[in-house]
Amino acid sequence: MTAAQAFVYDCQSGSFSYLSGSPEDRVWPASITKLFTAYIALQYLEPDRIITAGDALQLVGEGSSLAHISEGDMLSVEMLVAAMLMLSGNDAAYLLAAEAGRVIAEEPALTSTEAVMVFVSEMNGQTRKLGMSGTRFCNPDGYHDDRHYTTFADMVTLAEKVMGNELIMKYASAGSIQAVFENRAETEWKNSNFLVDPQSEYYSPYALGLKTGQTPQAGNCLLSAFRIEDRQYIIGVFGCEQKDDRFADTLQLFEQMLEKSVG
């Protein structure tokens, strides 16, 4: 194990079967944040709604992971969700947040900055409603901010909520897709989560997907879900040094959990 922090949660028993530290330990979620961005955006935007990329792209932080969306590109909400969850596109996250923020505020004329602020406020409002008391969001993409954090317990709540959303899971579990743009040719998108890529050495047929993350402060991290027979497990690893360590560590935890349950 290279992860600085990790947990395994058994959804059936409602308890942690492995835990380094406490359920309330604070972690940086990095791009795992985008799961919650998708969850909130889909409450206000229909999947087939077409969004034309505009100046919200200018809000994307330097060094961000991108879906390489350009101003003037036209994509459906569904494709932007896919871009967030598969490519971890911060550009897609800001486009969704700005569009949904204007809908939430019922103010189509809001600037992109204002609309994203409305969206982030809604994110934080819903964390409180869900009992995610150890979580605070400052942006829709997980770009590092010392005030942007969560906990193991809240990551479990987040995972359980998004696992009930068919559209989110469609792309959180997809190894690759042909992405459809309204204004240019299709292109292939591959998932940054190697657990769901059949071509990867880290592929697991038990993996349901979820989301990768990485910032210099958070290290490499991964929130994942697995199903075997009638049981589901949520596994989180945070602070891995190398990109692939998060997949190796997750599989190690899953295999140890299986051995323990069989024994």
Image: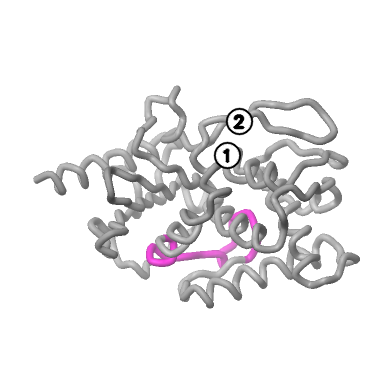
Picture disc at residue 123: none
Looking at the rendered image, the disc whose residue lies closer to the viewer, 1 or 2, is: 2
Mark found first going from the N terminus, 1 or 2: 1
Count neighbours of disc 2 (C-alpha within 10 A) and say few if under 14, some if 14 to 19, many if 20 or more.
some
Q: Is residue 81 above or below residue 148?
A: above
Q: CA distance from mark 1 to mark 2?
A: 9 Å
Depth check: give the residue in front, 120 or 232: 232
217 relative to 105 in the view: left or right: left
Mark 1: amino acid: Met
Q: Quadrant of residue 250?
A: top left
Q: Secondary structure at mark 1?
A: helix
Asked if the stretch drawn in magenta spans residue 153, the answer is yes
Specify the principal SS of the magenta part: loop
Residue contact between numbered discs 1 and 2, judged by CB atoms under 8 Å? yes
> What amino acid is labelled 2 in the image?
Ile
Residue at horizontal 60%, vertical 75%? 125
Magenta region: 138-155
Q: Which residue is mark 2?
A: 177
Callout 2: SS: strand
- In this picture the colour scheme is one colour
Which image quadrant for residue 103?
bottom right
Residue located at (38% from left, 40% from top):
207
Residue that mark 1 sits on: 86
Q: Position of residue 112 (x, y in %)?
A: 82, 60
Q: Position of residue 130 (x, y in %)?
A: 49, 73
Quick check: 176 above or below 257? above
Question: Looking at the picture, how far across and down is residue 116, in whole percent?
Answer: 74, 63
Q: Residue furthest right?
A: 109
Left or right: residue 15 compared with residue 45: left
**In the rendered view, would you say 169 is above or below 123?**
above
